[in-house]
Amino acid sequence: MGQDYISMWQDLGINLENHDCLLKALADIYQQIYLSQENRPEGMRYFDFVISEAHGLRIKELLEAKKQGKKVIGTFCVYVPEEMILAVNGICVGLCAGAQIGFDEAEKVLPKNTCDLIKAFIGFKLTQVCPYTESCDLLVGETTCDGKKKAYEILDKLTRKVYVMEVPHRKTEASKELFLKELFSLKDNLEELSGVKMSVESLKEGIKIVNEKRKALMRLESLRAYDPAPISGLDALLVNQIAFYDDPVRFTQKVNELCDELEEKIKKGIGVKPKGTPRILITSCPFALPNWKLHHIIETSGAVVVGEESCVGRRYYHTLVPENFSSVEEGIRLLAERYLKTHCACFTPNTERIEDIKNMAKNLKAQGIIYYSIQFCTPYLFEAYQVEKEINLPFLKIDTNYSMEDVGQLKTRCEAFIETL
Amino acid sequence: MKVLGLDVGSTYIKVAFFEKGNLKVLERDNTSYQPLEKCLRYIEKYQPDQVVATGYGRNLINTNLENCITISEIKAFAIGAKFIHPKVRTILDIGGQDTKAISLDEKGKVVKFEMNDRCSAGTGRFLEIMCKALGYKIEDLNHLEIEGEVKVKISSLCTVFAESEVISLIAQGVPREEILKGVHLSVVYKVLSMLKRILIREDLVFAGGCSQNKLLKRLLENQLKIKVITLKESPFLGAIGAGIFGLKSTTS
């Protein structure tokens, strides 16, 4: 990395020593897991580049945008409408973290039996290794699970930048009203922060940009339905992860270019793995960058991952927002309706999620389901029982965390499961 | 055609040698810190045309050998148990660091399985450490005939805490045979919870390094209320299964 990056990180308050460790570890893991894959699509080069410049060029872009008066807003959940952030001329970045960094520090302020997703974002903050968190003008938290809710209180003490919006836990009319009110409050806050008034045009523009992004991701998902799979699950996961922090317009274009290439490959019958390779659908918890553990284990055990029913995956791009409306209020109402179709396990009851899994399994021709929960993620751990009962496919439940200590056992489990398909 | 099935476990390397389709030799050795060297010695000895590796160290062997393929322990045990005991529908494998419960259909296909997590409760290693505290060797357990009800309860599932429970029982003057029974029952309880998560059907074959342990077998039968079948090949079922898989893959 060039000298200008180092001074940029210094200015952001990054702890260079910790940060260096993180970047080195990442480069090694990326080489091992990603660059060693065979038959990768050409179109993945862009995403490799984005990863290599994740803490460099993209941060530079964010800082330049900030100089021009734009605000950077960090989020931790697919319930926070990115469209509204764009509508006040803001930039939205996903801040969930997927590596065991700063856990010793995190465990000083969090209970030990907290999920790794939460430990990681607090750990990243406490060890000052995330230039995204440091670039943000506002961090939007939400009340999805108890752990996150309480962690935001701590994060606010550390940053003084946290705004929490309430996400209801039921799908009743009253809950819908509550969520709508929350979106209006978020609007006021975003407008105040950015000094930009949301207009019908700007909201339409924000919705259009995000719709195009989601459409591209849906297109990518639909191409994974082919056998032989034209793209590995690992690469598709990477694209879904990058969706959370890359420039949305550029990202959409690159995903579509990748899809064009994949369509050509499908026509020619070219895949990344032989035709007939067992097909796995992963469901449940999110895979924040750089969490590639389970996909890597599965895809080095003779199978291919064809979809993720996850917040990094289907729950992010599931539905579009209508682009025809005549007032900001109406637009926000349409957003609220769309977002409440995100079937997160923090809702009760949440039977729609089971339908989503069934549909995905059918459309993607999955032969087995791997139910992935992060240790201590109560909502998803609980739903495993109901999902297993309702889904008529071979089912493997994996309860794990970000550490590598159980890789051997997970590999045995996944291999044995794949052998049964 | 010579095929070698290698089950590289955490404690023992088990070997099943097949020639002209017949099982000729079963043998085993400590895994130690040189599993690869030990496996290569077996390969030198038997000169197989095909090697099939399973167990914890399967990939180590696979990456260092050309004519080697791998299968998971679960599949290997399923194939091996079906070959030796065709009526098998459930397998309980208590090995050194892993314990597995496997449910099979009539054809011997794996329907469901459970494995211990990253915890040593209910494994051979747990027994081994408790034995050491009681002055037994793990091999002694296979010959011991310990009668009577279990009177002492070991409540901790954590190996370190269970060991301190054992030590405090010794200090209270409890006879070591009684403590040993309690230790075994603790393993049985842990294993039962795993078995209950799959479908238990007869015949149930007890496999792995701990399968020759008579006390464990008796306590399991008491709890399960069904017959637990131990075969003389029980510790070798993984290696046998790997070998059979090799025979099938070379003929097809």
Image: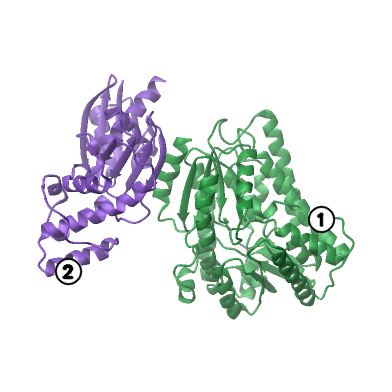
Residue A208, disc: 1
Residue drawn at 25 percent across, 34 percent down: B15
Compared to B84, does B21 lie above or below? above
Query: Residue A328, percent across and down?
Result: 85, 66
Q: Which of A132 and A329 is in front in this view?
A: A329
Q: Name the residue under label 2.
A: B168
Q: Is mark 2 on a helix, strand or loop?
A: helix
The image quarter in which residue A247 lies: bottom right
Q: Quadrant of the N terminus of chain A?
A: bottom right
Residue drawn at 62 percent across, 40 percent down: A231
In this orientation, does residue B30 appear? no
Q: Which of B251 and A368 is in front in this view?
A: A368
Q: In this view, does A108 lie to the left or right of B37?
A: right
Q: Nearer the viewer, residue A198 or A20?
A: A198
Q: What residue type is labelled 1?
A: Lys
The image quarter in which residue A265 lies: top right
Residue drawn at 53 percent across, 57 percent down: A380
Chain A's colour is: green
Query: Residue A74, percent across and down?
Result: 67, 68
Query: Residue B139, percent across and down?
Result: 15, 47
Q: In this view, does B25 lie to the left or right of A23?
A: left
Q: Which amino acid does label 2 sit on?
A: Ser
Q: Nearer the viewer, residue B111 or A81?
A: B111
The image quarter in which residue B185 lies: bottom left
Q: Nearer the viewer, mark 1 or mark 2?
A: 2
Chain B's colour is: purple
Q: How crowded is mark 1: few (under 14 residues within 10 Å), some or many (20 or more)?
A: some
Q: Which chain carries label 2?
A: B
In this orientation, does residue B144 appear? yes
